Image: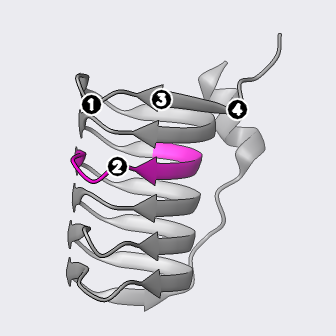
Amino acid sequence: MTTPTFSVLGADLAVKGDITAGAELHIDGQVEGDITCAGLVQGEASIICGAIRAQTARLAGTVRGGIEVGQLVVLKTARIEGDVKYDALTIEQGAQIDGKLTHGIEPVDSENTLALVN
């Protein structure tokens, strides 16, 4: 079985529950639950209510919950309500973060993430 390189949750999709993905996840819709994945790309209109844990993340929408990401890019349209832990951080001018920023996280183990998916 071949593992997909990415999964997409479209703008018309609303998910209640935790999501675990071994690959990159692109979210344009709404998620109410925790997200664990290798990489996360969030669209501008997306709303995530829950914790995010990933190796990389590019956030452009609204996040209400804690974030633990190795390499984090917060785009100017992003609105984050929660504490953020990171190893590398880029914040565009105009982005809003209402929470504590902390450098240094435990790395996400992609092999264990895949084991959770299977």
Residue where numbered disc 4 is placed: 114
Residue where numbered disc 1 is placed: 11
Q: Compute the Cα span from label 1 to label 2.
A: 9 Å
User: Where residue 16 appears, x then y in whole percent?
Assistant: 22, 26
The residue at the point 46 percent across, 67 percent down is: 68
User: Where residue 5 appears, x then y in whole percent?
Assistant: 71, 32
Q: Compute the Cα span from label 3 to label 4.
A: 17 Å
Q: Amino acid at mark 4?
A: Leu
Labelled pair 1, 3 in contact (Cβ < 8 Å): no
Figure quadrant of residue 102: bottom left
Q: Amino acid at mark 1?
A: Ala
> Going by the image, does 106 lie left or right of 3?
left
**The N terminus sits in image quarter:** top right
User: Where residue 106 appears, x then y in whole percent?
Assistant: 61, 70
Which mark, residue 108?
Answer: none
Which mark, residue 8?
Answer: 3
Work out whether mark 1 precedes mark 2 in sequence or the reverse, and give the earlier one: 1
Front-lying residue, 92 or 99: 92
The residue at the point 41 percent across, 43 percent down is: 35
Q: What SS does tag 2 mark?
A: loop
Q: Is residue 63 magenta?
A: no
Above or below 105: residue 48: above
Which span is picked out in magenta?
36-47
Q: Compute the Cα span from label 3 to label 2.
A: 11 Å
Above or below 113: residue 96: below
Residue where numbered disc 2 is placed: 43
Mark 3 or mark 4, which is nearer to you? 3
Labelled pair 3, 4 in contact (Cβ < 8 Å): no
Q: Compute the Cα span from label 2 to label 4.
A: 24 Å
Mark 1 or mark 4, which is nearer to you? 1
Q: Compute the Cα span from label 1 to label 4.
A: 25 Å
